[in-house]
Image: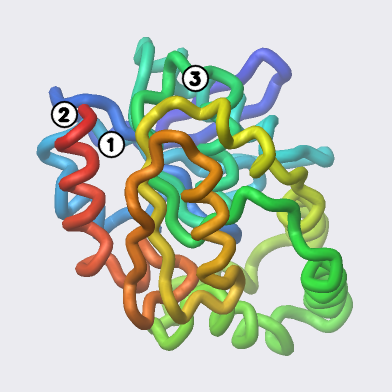
Amino acid sequence: MATVTTGDGQLVSYVDHGGDGPAVVLLHSFLMDVSMWAAQVAAFGGSYRLIAIDERGHGETPVNAPFDYWDVARDALAVLDDLGIGSAAVIGTSQGGFIALRMAFLAPERVTALAVLGTSGEAEDEQIAAAYNQLTEVWIAQGPDRVVEATAKICLGDHDASEWTPKWSAVEPERLRLIANALVSRDGVLDRAGEITAPVLVLHGTADLAYPVAKAEALVAALPKAEPLVLVEGGAHFLSLTHADDVNPHLERFLSAYL
């Protein structure tokens, strides 16, 4: 993996899959890493220059202080700077979608198109945030075994989680607390969505256990250039991983239309 150190001293790891096509940034979900995008790299990596980023506190990108998703959006822009890329499309699933939206606010001239999956433009519901905070503290106090299965169900539905649960179990307590806090304390941006002038594709699974379809509907309604919402029947929260065969044709069509 390559790395870049941002202006505020944050090291960011990423994989530039290369290629001569237009640049596309890939932003993974909570607890995941760049390898989450293997199915997309296989499907259309030959047509685009796919750049997958390990977000702050995930994979090989460290974290040692509180942060928010605006910080991570700036990290992603720093990766583009490091590669000499002026603009790119951005695809993000769940947490990656939160970050993708913030990239479009921070640097609208650099985000040519957005595709977000399993994402909301709203702050976390207070009751859900409290439940996730409790889950995090149980994880830290009693070990991952008590909560990893429940986490996998929320994130992956019935998809085989065996590749991921060992990685999740190995996350250090302080790192877990920092990345969880960024998730549950994020600000809402739905009221600003009208500022995003890039074309946007929103995909959502009907079996998403983290965010109901209504969250995706609200996001589409607020975005001036959003395409009609794409619902994937039975799709889980980490949709681009669990239902790649359903998702990839929509992503390929969208990218080819706007890049």
Query: What count of labels does the image hold?
Result: 3
Q: Quadrant of residue 2?
A: top left
- Of residue 216 and residue 256, the one placed in the foreground of this image is 216
Residue depicted at x 47% and y 23%: 79
**Which mark identifies residue 108?**
3
Say whether disc 2 or disc 3 marks the residue closer to the N-terminus.
2
Q: Residue at x 73, y 88 (%)?
A: 146
Is the N terminus in the top left, top right, bottom left or bottom right quadrant? top left
Residue type at mark 1: give it: Leu
The residue lying toward the viewer, choosing from 92 and 5, is: 92
Count residues near mark 3 (Cα–Cα under 10 Å), then give few for <14, some for 14-19, many for 20+: some
Q: Residue 23, image x and y in percent?
A: 28, 27
Label 2 close to label 1 by CB (< 8 Å)? yes
| Relative image position of residue 45 (x, y in whole percent) | 18, 42
What is the three-letter code of the residue carrying label 3?
Pro
Q: Are marks 2 and 3 in contact (CB under 8 Å)?
A: no
Q: Is residue 166 visible?
A: no
Foreground mark, 2 or 3, reads: 3
Question: Which residue is the site of mark 1?
Answer: 50
The answer to whether 94 is drawn above or below residue 161 in the figure is: above
The colour scheme applied to this rendered structure is: rainbow
Q: Answer left or right for 55 relative to 116.
A: right
